[in-house]
């Protein structure tokens, strides 16, 4: 499951996975939890759990992936992009 870690101009970390964009919700010693950026707009419950640069778990979204690469680039300016497998 490949994903990308993104960093916006403002220094905010985001994660791109399966065409969805996530923002960091919580981070602990062992893992970090990311919530869908449609959380407020669509009340989406989609989340991913990440540990050691691996996706441990991902939950379903209530919408189609709307964050295609082009859309994402239009909405945010990223300074950094790292891909992981
Ligand atoms: Zn979602």
Image (cartoon, grey):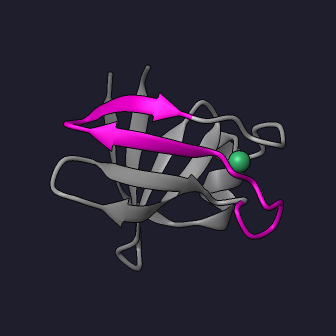
Horizontal and vertical percent for residue 46? 65, 45
Residue 40 belongs to magenta span? yes
Q: Residue at x 75, y 54 (%)?
A: 44
Q: Residue at x 42, y 24 (%)?
A: 2
Q: Residue at x 64, y 53 (%)?
A: 72
Residue 55 is left or right of residue 59, and the answer is left
Residue 9 vertical placement versus 24 (above, below)? below
Q: 67 and 25: which one is in front?
A: 25
User: Residues in magenta?
Assistant: 39-58
Horizontal and vertical percent for residue 1? 44, 19
Residue 84 vertical placement versus 16 (above, below)? above
Residue 56 is left or right of residue 16, and the answer is left
Residue 42 is left or right of residue 53, and the answer is right
Horizontal and vertical percent for residue 67? 70, 46
Question: Which residue extends farthest bottom?
Answer: 10
Residue 17 is left or right of residue 74, and the answer is left
Question: Which residue extends farthest left?
Answer: 29
Q: Quadrant of residue 75?
A: bottom right
Q: How many labels were placed on the picture? A: 0
């Amino acid at each position: 499951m490949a994903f990308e870690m993104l960093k916006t101009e403002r220094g905010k970390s985001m994660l791109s996975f399966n065409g969805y964009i996530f923002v960091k919700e919580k981070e602990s010693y062992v893992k970090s939890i990311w919530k869908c950026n449609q959380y407020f707009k669509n009340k989406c419950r989609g989340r991913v759990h990440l540990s050691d640069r691996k996706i441990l778990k991902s939950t379903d979204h209530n919408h189609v992936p709307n964050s295609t690469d082009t859309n994402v680039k239009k909405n945010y300016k990223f300074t950094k992009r790292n891909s992981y497998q």
